[in-house]
Amino acid sequence: MTAEELFFMNENQTHFINAFGDWRTDSYAKNKYEKDIAKTKNYKNNYFYHATGGFGESGLGNGLYLGKDKSALDNFYNLDGTEGKILTYYGEPKFIDLTNSEEFEIFEKEAKKLYLDENYLRNYTVLKGYDGIRYFDIETTGEEFVLYNTETVRIIEEV
């Protein structure tokens, strides 16, 4: 599914409306949708971006947190460029798609059974043959990625 298809899923729409308001009628929610939520029209093949600003990510363990919509990342994590910079990466990492919350929960339970430390998601992802996780977080930029095997990308630009 694309970032837009994920955003418009009933579960995600309900969550977004409860958190921010209706993006079709509420100005705050509309601004959040327009500026913070990733749009696939802004993606470039094999390019990923990392925001260095004040809102750090750590929900899926230690890894390189990436997105594919440079503008959305900059706006959300770097407060529209006032708190950090955007690092550009290029590569073809293999991500397991855990954008469906039920599939994510199953994966997480399996990982916790095998690994008792804080790196259970990283270890299980790598065991399964993936470099990272593609996930969806409606309260940040929507579609995002956490890369555990950072050797699959190279930094190409610091903006």
Image (cartoon, grey):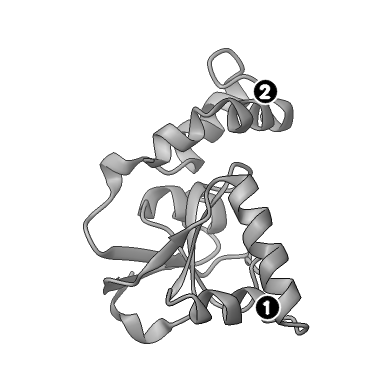
Which residue lies at the image location 39% right of the left edge and 49% below the top edge? 71
Looking at the rendered structure, the kind of residue marked 1 is Tyr
- Specify the quadrant that holds the C terminus: bottom left
Real-space Cα distance between discs 1 and 2? 35 Å
Q: Is residue 137 above or below residue 17?
A: below
Residue 120 tag number: 1
Which residue lies at the image location 67% right of the left edge and 23% below the top edge? 21
Front residue of 31/140: it is 140
How far across and how far down the image is residue 46, in percent?
25, 64
Residue 21 tag number: 2
Q: Earlier in the sequence, mark 1 or mark 2?
A: 2
Q: Is residue 80 above or below residue 88?
A: above
**Left or right of 152, for residue 34:** right
Q: Quadrant of residue 56?
A: bottom right
Outermost residue, top direction? 25
Front residue of 129/31: it is 129
Element at label 1: helix
Looking at the rendered structure, the kind of residue marked 2 is Gly
- Specify the quadrant that holds the N terminus: top left
